[in-house]
Each structure stands twice: as structure tokens, then as C-alpha cells.
Amino acid sequence: KISSWIIRLTTFFSTQKVGNEDPEAQMFLLNHQSHLDIVVLETSTARDITWVAKKELFEVPFFGLAMRLPKDIAVERESKMAMVKLLKDAKEVVKTGRVIAMFPEGTRSSGGKMLPFKAGAKVVADALVLKVQPVVLMQTAKHYSMKNFIYIPGKIKMIFLDSFVADKTDPNWLNEVRGKMQRVYDDELSNSSSNR
């Protein structure tokens, strides 16, 4: 949180929260467009967050240290044992009362269309019967993109959707969540000129 607040204060962006954050949520699922996404959530909630991210990010100077110190979860995406380790680490995190945050797209998307959600989030939520809350971040890449050398201070809207308890008997809930998040994103983009 300290590193996130330093970034937020030096990049001069603010946030607008829509909907209610569930204080009992055990997993946040967010769409991913910008390096700023982690900072937006970290500085908008008092919850102690554990991020699930690819192992390579833990080796990036400064950023990697900011993920290693709070013991975020590193995932080796090509490893056959990755899911076993992820479940083990997630179980330990839940025991401590921290909330798990994941970008189910697996990487940053562009053009406003969310990528297909990877199964890892569902496997973890189903196995541990987690209370999941989807969060839609609006156009963070419009404000900050290292790839496109964009930096525009402004207000970033984050929309908290209704939380639910993962049901492993429902094979489609992750795809349904993606569809709902995309509809919320599209509706917000259509109805709010500030997001265009």
C-alpha cells in the first residue's frame, strides 16, 4: 500500500467508487488495462490485498520488491505444478483474512474488450468456496500506459458489482461474470462522456 500511495500521489489521479465494496469478500476479480490497476485498488480499499501475478513480475526492480515484501502469490504459468502451488498459497492467504485479487484475463487487454477469463480464478474460488466480488475499472489505460507512453492525470472510476459465493457445481459462473463485467463496462462507456 505504501508504494501504491507513493505512485498515486505522484501521478495525480483520483478515484470514484460506484457500488459497495463487500467487507466480507475474499476475492476481487478485476479487468486489466494498465499498470495503474493495482495502484487504483490498493489505494481505494483498506483491505489487506494479496495479488496473484506471474513470477516474472516479482523480478522487476522496485515493482518486484513491492510484491515480494507483502508476500503476494507468484505463479509460474508454464509449470505443471503451478495450480497446486496457487491453491496451497491461496489457502494460507485466506486463513490470515487477506483478500485475494486476480486479473482473470491473465494480461492487459486493449480496445475496451475483455479477454477470455482464465480458469485459475474459478479453480481457486471453487476449491476454497470463496466469496467473490467483481470490480470493473474504467479506462485506466487512457490515463496511464507505459507501452504507449501515455500519462494523463484524472479521475478513474471503479465499479463494485454484487458479490457471490463461488459454486463449483456451476461450470459457467466465470464466463457469466466476464459477460456481466463487459456489459457494465460497455454501458458505462456509452452513458458517460467522461469515459470516452
Image (spheres, grey):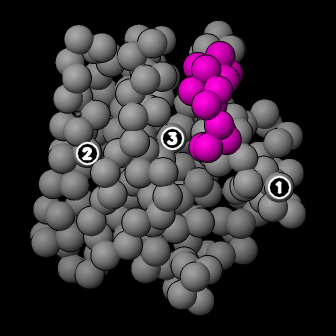
Answer whether labels 3 and 2 touch (C-beta < 8 Å): no
SS at circle 1: helix
Answer whether labels 2 and 1 touch (C-beta < 8 Å): no
Residue type, mark 2 in image = Arg
Q: Which residue is mark 1?
A: 59
Which quadrant holds residue 76?
top right
Q: Is residue 2 visible?
A: no
Q: Earlier in the sequence, mark 3 or mark 1?
A: 1
Which quadrant holds residue 83?
top right
Q: CA distance from mark 3 to mark 1?
A: 19 Å
Q: Which residue is mark 3?
A: 102
Residue type, mark 3 in image = Met
Q: Is residue 82 magenta?
A: yes
Crowd rating for badge 2 (residues with CA inside 10 Å; few <14, some 14–19, many 20+): many
Q: Is residue 164 visible?
A: yes
Q: Magenta part of the protein: which range?
A: 75-89
Which mark, residue 175? none
Image coordinates for residue 21, horizontal then vertical, percent: 40, 35
Rendered residue at 38%/73% (across/down): 110
The quadrant of the picture occupied by the C terminus is bottom left
Q: Which residue is mark 2?
A: 178
Q: Is residue 1 left or right of residue 142?
A: right
Q: Is residue 28 above or below residue 154?
A: above
Image coordinates for residue 59, horizontal then vertical, percent: 83, 55
Image coordinates for residue 88, horizontal then vertical, percent: 65, 16
Front residue of this view, candidates 167 and 154: 167
Q: Earlier in the sequence, mark 3 or mark 2?
A: 3
